[in-house]
């Protein structure tokens, strides 16, 4: 598994479902470079159990992300047809009807692999046949990407562990605070609180005040 923080987010072009119903063939995060921050997250599979809770949780906070100029984009190794079907399934039946942000179809598994979140890898057996070593689905990876296309934060969870969407929003606030003020964010920082200057004097001043 690779660490992408400080590096350019891998570029890709793949099918996606947008606005909850429309399939587009060549979706790319490159469209946001120079315009928006991006919160790009992976989940293991459509029609499962923890995954819909996460996708609905991101949808419930979508207006808050958008108010900060952040584009939320999801991705799994399922096909775009599977995404579409899940999006048409009501919430009370395990579906994600009502989710509006794009969901990318990484059926070739190349996006998950490029971002370092693919659980498993291809190998060859004794007869030279290609076999999968692992489930070949995505871990619960999350990547916060700045307007220049650089990964500023990443988080990767094992399948049973759902993410905290409020924490993802807090990381957006921290990044934008740093970008706008040039001050860094100490432990447990929240929007509206003071940051500190990245100097010994700044740290001492912050600690003495807290």
Image (cartoon, grey):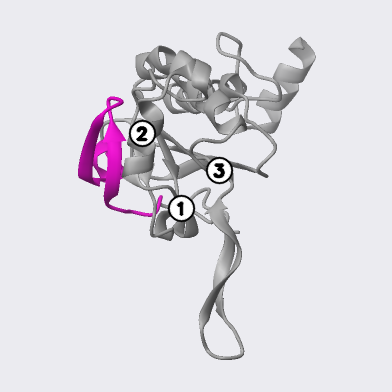
Closer to the N terminus: mark 2 or mark 1? 1
Closer to the N terminus: mark 3 or mark 1? 1
Above or below — where is 151 with respect to 163? below
From the top left corner, tell me how far across and down residue 154 is, in percent. 56, 42
Residue in front for this viewpoint, 168 or 45:
45
From the top left corner, tell me how far across and down residue 179 is, in percent. 44, 28
The quadrant where residue 146 appears: top left
Q: Are marks 3 and 2 in contact (CB under 8 Å)?
A: no
- Residue 18 on the magenta span: yes
What is the CA distance from the residue labelled 3 to the residue labelled 1? 16 Å
Q: Which residue is mark 2?
A: 85
> Which SS class for mark 1?
loop
Closer to the N terminus: mark 3 or mark 2? 2
The quadrant where residue 48 appears: top right
Of badges 3 and 1, nearer the viewer stands 3
Label drawn at residue 105: none
Local packing at callout 1 (Cα closer than 10 Å; few below 14, some 14-19, many 20+) is few
Question: Which residue sits at x=61%, y=25%?
Answer: 185
Question: Which residue sits at x=68%, y=44%?
Answer: 158
- Residue 32 on the magenta span: yes
From the top left corner, tell me how far across and down residue 28 is, in percent. 27, 45
Residue 72 in view (yes/no): no
What is the CA distance from the residue labelled 2 to the residue labelled 1? 35 Å
From the top left corner, tell me how far across and down residue 31 is, in percent. 23, 40
Residue 152 in view (yes/no): yes
> Which SS class for mark 3?
strand
Question: Which residue sits at x=32%, y=43%?
Answer: 80
Q: Which residue is mark 1?
A: 7
Q: Are marks 3 and 1 in contact (CB under 8 Å)?
A: no
> Which SS class for mark 2?
helix
């Amino acid at each position: 598994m690779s660490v992408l923080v400080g590096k350019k987010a891998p570029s890709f072009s793949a099918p996606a479902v947008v606005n909850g119903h429309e399939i587009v063939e060549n979706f790319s995060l490159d469209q946001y470079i120079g315009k928006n921050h991006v919160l790009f997250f992976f989940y293991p599979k459509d029609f499962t159990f923890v995954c819909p809770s996460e996708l609905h949780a991101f949808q419930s906070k979508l207006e808050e992300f958008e108010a900060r100029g952040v584009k939320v984009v999801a991705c799994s190794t399922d096909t775009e047809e599977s995404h579409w079907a899940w999006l048409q399934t009501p919430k009370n039946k395990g579906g994600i009807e009502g989710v509006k942000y794009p969901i990318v179809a990484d059926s070739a598994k190349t996006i998950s692999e490029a971002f370092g979140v693919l659980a498993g890898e291809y190998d060859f057996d004794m007869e030279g046949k290609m076999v999968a070593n692992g489930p070949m689905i995505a871990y619960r990876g999350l990547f916060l990407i700045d307007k220049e296309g650089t990964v500023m934060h990443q988080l990767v969870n094992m399948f049973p562990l759902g993410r905290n969407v409020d924490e993802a929003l807090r990381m957006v606030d921290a990044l934008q605070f740093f970008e706008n003020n040039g001050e860094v964010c100490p432990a447990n920082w929240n929007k509206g609180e003071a940051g500190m200057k990245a100097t010994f004097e700044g740290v001492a001043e912050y600690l003495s005040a807290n």
